[in-house]
Image: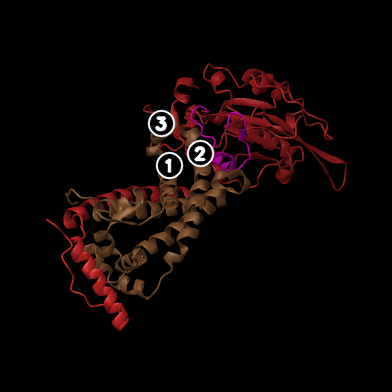
Amino acid sequence: MTTELGLSIKRKSATPSSGTNIRRDHSIKQVEVSKLVDIDLCIGCKACEVACKEWNDLQVEETHNFGGYQSHEDLTASTWDLMRFNEVDLDNDGIAWLIRKDSCLHCEEPGCLLACPAPGAIVQYENGIVDFDQDKCIGCQYCVSGCPFDIPRFDAETQKVYKCTMCVDRIGNGMEPACVKACPTGSIRFGTKDDMLHYGEEKVTKLKDRGFDDALLYDPEGVGGLHMMYVVPRGEMLDEYGLPDEPTVKGASFFPAMSGLRKLGSVATWAGLLGAAVFFLRTGRRFPPPEDKAVASAREKGGAAEGEAQPPQETREEGRQP
Amino acid sequence: MRTQAEPQEMIVRYSMAERLLHWFVAITFIYLLLSGFALGYPRMAWLNDILGGGQTARFLHPIVGVAFTVGVVLMFVIWLRDMVFDAKDRAWSRDLRNYVREGHSSVDVERFNAGQKGYFWFAVLTAVLLLITGLPLWFPTLISAGWNQSARLLHHVLFLLTVGGFIIHVYMSTVMLPGTVEGMTTGRVTRAWAAWHHPSWFRKQEADRN
């Protein structure tokens, strides 16, 4: 995996034709990276949460006991990684204890990036990482409503939106993301997308052998695939894990419509200005006639209106003056 | 228009309050127009640089939008009585082709002609609809992405309509019909202007004065 290749820009928000990759074979998925969370191996230790806070230098947030093992209730602008715990009663024996590392999934078709109106505020690299450039963020929060996984968080103080960067600064220097580094069981893995797919499919087969008939690799097509996939042992409980069954980029028809509307708007605005200019060249300025003539005409209309109560048939006077 | 030594006799067209209100709406509209282009058109994002940055534009646009709508609602209140369509307006509309060609209609026009009335109702309607479709864009997290996107499309369509109206409005009042914009700046128009463009209104003004 070549980081230099991977960090070419694939596209930027609100920037048409923003790809920069001139190198060979960029259609081949050789530079795409991915994390993979093997939920089967996760013990819910939250080392990834801590590592994320430490590497990204994010402030610790106070929390309280709300009846579970989960450290905080939700992601925030400075909590980009959160272990979500859910206990589900099973019909026959005991409970299923569902634990999921919740952080940005780095979609191949990122709803956030597509919704963003600020040029360059959201960037997707060739390696698949979706990153926010807060310097260019205008704080509109369209990304928040555009995300199918409810990941980006708005900070009221800075008026900007934040989320996991997949430690793009570490990856750019040949290191794995902090959460991967910290994971004591190898539940969070990192590598090329191909390698991770391979691992995931093998693991799903093993889980099925062990009796998890609905085990699956979570890499939904509706968002073009993910750059943080999950191996889900209880695939029938996606809902309970907090994962949408079939996530899609919202507004597949919206983006072409908006783009068309912008083109129409540009043409119409210029056409309007040009039209006014041509109209001026044809008709020029329309001065009223001299005062006595104008006043006489007005009084005449007054007399006609009183006399016949209908609009007068007046001979049109030449309004232009030399 | 005319060079003459003695001061010309003028007629009051718009009161101080009307003019203040008009320019308040005009200035907020121009800000909304510029920041709207900056926010809605990636290739016009450079406009953000003269508006204090994208974040500032995003912050101020909805607030100025509310101020603009309040201004338009006040306009609605003070001008409503003059803006009701009547039989004369139907005659004026039938005569529209001539009006466009000559810049003058033979109809015995009141304080406002049917075109001005039409623009008034157009402005009130689009202002209200822009505010309604703007709310989901102001607070995008309160609604689903689908509603957000629908609102963005509608807001954009309304925006383009107002741009068209604005171009016509400015062209007619400054370039096409000399003496018009003075009514909104100094508040006064010449007797010739009043008698020519608004004969019925002109006679009433004369009658009031005598």
Chain A: what color? Answer: red
Note the chain letter of the brown one: B
**Which marked residue is nearer to the observer: mark 3 or mark 1?**
1
The amino acid sitting under disc 2 is: Leu
Residue B49, numbered label: 3
Q: Amino acid at mark 3?
A: Asp
Q: Residue at point 72% right, 25% down?
A: A61
Q: Which image quadrant for residue B82? A: bottom left
Q: Earlier in the sequence, mark 3 or mark 2?
A: 3
The residue tagged with tag 3: helix, strand or loop?
helix
- Magenta-drawn stretch contains B57: no
Q: Residues within 10 Å of mark 1 (few under 14, many from 20)?
A: some
- Do marks 3 and 2 share a chain? yes
Residue ID for mark 1: B31
How many angstroms separate mark 3 from mark 2 (CA)?
Answer: 14 Å
Q: Are marks 3 and 1 in contact (CB under 8 Å)?
A: no
Q: Of the numbered discs in the image, which one, if any, rests on residue B60?
A: 2
User: Which element carries disc 2, helix, strand or loop?
Assistant: helix
